[in-house]
Image (tube, rainbow, N blue to C red):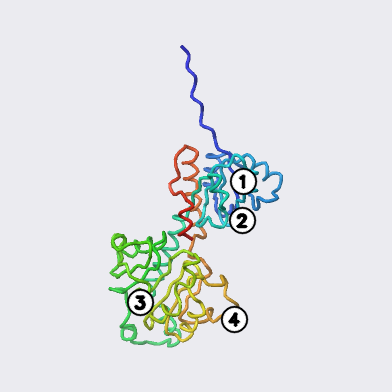
Amino acid sequence: MTTTPATAPTTPAALLAMGPGIAEQLFGARQRARLTALVDTDPGLVAHRLTGPTPEVARALAGAELLITCWGAPPLTADVLAAAPRLRAVVHAAGSVKHHITPACWERGLRVTSAAGANALPVAEYTLAAILQAGKNVLPAARRYRELRAPHDWRAELAGHGNYRRCVGIVGASRIGRRVIELLRPFDLDVLLFDPYVDAGTAVRLGAEKVGLDELCARSRIVSVHAPELPATRHLIGAAQLAAMADGATLINTSRGSLIDGDALLPELVSGRLNAVLDVTEPEVPPADSPLYDLPNVLLTPHVAGSLGDEIHRLADFALDEVARYASGLPFADPVTPEDLARSA
């Protein structure tokens, strides 16, 4: 009696598709070695465009079963998919897939996964640092120290500040919002949560008290925004919410600039009534003459809360874990569905 040897699992063909220079940042030597061990790909061939591609990219796209994407990935339109008859899945080594996953992808039945969970970690860490510094009134204190340059009764000046039983408001129970709440657990803070999709019981299990947005703004000394950018969330924090915030309160935004009405916020900051930590603005880069650059009560950073430097390798490692699952015939650990996109960034 003879037996037929088991067929060895095939190695899926893959193509990298992302913006110029991104692949070099994403994949270090260790990640590159693992990539080539998992899939059949040329790591030096990166598609910056899939419409009118080079002959090399066109050939790779035609045979690709898997696309590995990141920031700057070209849109996967119906025409692109027609040129990729074997494509079955997209692994996105970054956060949102809204910029390149089109309705045609869902119609085709592509499996999609994203490293949004991995990218949430550094944003939450940045936010935690901002919250704790805001509670200690660090920005104004540092400004005053530069002005005085002499001994001073700081305990008296900062008597109304500190991080014991400080009320912190989290706007949005997104991946990042939930991670921020988790990171706040070891501290003696009172956490409020606004999210229309979260009930009171879920909020308690997360470690927060569910409240309305206006109440959150009125009760919180620190308000941190983590809602997704959707038509319904544009200017979610407007003039009424800002007016409800107490004098000296701090507004933190690491989500998207459009969630805050900048025209309403600016007078509150110029007057010095509110403080702000803004990693995102609308427009993404404020005009050169914007007061935001010079206001002493504003910490303005250039959208650096998300993954950068060596943190980018965390995204690559997560994506490669998903590639390994796909190659082994397993479901993705963090799949993206059309329903997810309706309520996510």
Residue 19's disc number:
2
Q: CA distance from mark 3 to mark 4?
A: 29 Å
| Mark closer to the observer (1, 2) | 1
| Residue contact between numbered discs 1 and 2, judged by CB atoms under 8 Å | no
Residue name at image x 54 percent, y 78 percent: 293
Residue type at the position of mark 3: Arg
- How packed mark 1 is, by other alpha carbons closer than 10 Å (few <14, some 14-19, many 20 or more), is some
Residue on which the image places disc 4: 289
Q: Residue furthest top?
A: 1
Residue type at the position of mark 2: Gly
Question: Secondary structure under badge 1?
Answer: helix
Q: CA distance from mark 2 to mark 3?
A: 40 Å
Q: CA distance from mark 1 to mark 2?
A: 19 Å
Q: Percent from the top left, x then y, of residue 250?
A: 40, 77
Residue type at the position of mark 1: Leu
Question: Secondary structure under badge 2?
Answer: loop
In the image, is residue 112 above or below residue 188? above
In the image, is residue 196 above or below residue 113? below
Residue 81's disc number:
1
Q: CA distance from mark 4 to mark 1?
A: 44 Å
Question: Closer to the camera, 81 or 133?
Answer: 81
Residue name at image x 44 percent, y 55 percent: 117
Q: Percent from the top left, x then y, of residue 295?
A: 50, 82
* Sequence-earlier tag: 2 or 3: 2
Residue on which the image places disc 3: 221
Residue type at the position of mark 4: Asp
* Sequence-earlier tag: 1 or 3: 1
Question: Secondary structure under badge 4?
Answer: loop
